Image (cartoon, grey):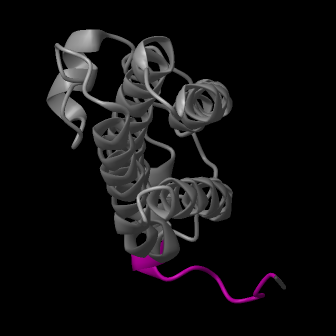
Amino acid sequence: MAKSDKSPSKSAAKSAKVARVAVAPGAAPIDIGISAEHRAAIAQGLNALLADTFTLYLTTHNFHWNVTGPMFNTLHTMFMAQYTELWNAVDPIAERVRALGFPAMGSFADYSKASSLPDAPGTPPKAKEMIRILVDGHEAVARTARGLYPLVDEASDEPTADLLTQRLDVHEKAAWMLRSMLEE
């Protein structure tokens, strides 16, 4: 992108000043070209994605431990691959929240409040119901990620857009593969 020789407009100067606002007293100002308001809203949305991802991770790991029946070996292996991928996803999401200048959620209480997914059932369901629950979970996480795109696009936040694209690819494929196992 070429820099303009024009001096910034008053609204652009105000926006630039807002982008330098420190997140907390004593914190170093952040000037990454995204306004403080956009950074705060994106961080809030990413924390919701983090909560959804962690909740789905826990549910998937639970099902890995508790699956039974004729599809045991297939599902046990598939669930392990999925929970491992989900576990590896939480760190980049949390680190993006931090890069935007905000704290990443990290407690079960926060996750349960922010997640759009229900907790895993107290009693392990049958294998096919586990699959249905995980399809719903992956689709819900995809909706959470996709819901952030307008804000991320408005803020020209390409790193977050890239992260969301990667997450959407994973969740849409996982939902498709799980859904395929439900066909008769």
Q: Is residue 136 visible?
A: yes
Q: Quadrant of residue 67?
A: top left
Of the pair 40 and 177, the residue shown nearer to us: 177
**Residue drawn at (64%, 82%), measured in percent from left and top?**
7
Q: Is residue 130 above or below residue 125?
A: below
Magenta stretch, overall SS:
loop
**Residue drawn at (75%, 87%), measured in percent from left and top?**
4
Check if residue 184 falls in the magenta segment: no
Q: Quadrant of residue 11?
A: bottom left
Of the pair 131 and 93, the residue shown nearer to us: 131
Please identify the residue farthest to the front as the structure is shown: 70
Does residue 157 appear left or right of residue 3 in this picture? left
Q: Is residue 124 above or below residue 134?
A: above
Of the pair 67 and 150, the residue shown nearer to us: 67
Q: Quadrant of residue 66?
A: top left
Residues shaded magenta: 3-12
Image quadrant for the N terminus?
A: bottom right
Q: Position of residue 63 (x, y in %)?
A: 42, 22
**Tally of numbered tags:** 0
Q: Position of residue 60 (x, y in %)?
A: 45, 27
Of the pair 95 and 20, the residue shown nearer to us: 95
Please identify the residue farthest to the right as the structure is shown: 2
Check if residue 9 falls in the magenta segment: yes
**Residue drawn at (62%, 54%), measured in percent from left and top?**
170
Q: Position of residue 54 (x, y in %)?
A: 42, 26
Q: Position of residue 84 (x, y in %)?
A: 66, 25
Q: Is residue 29 visible?
A: no
Q: Is residue 85 above or below residue 62?
A: below
Image quadrant for the C terminus?
A: bottom left
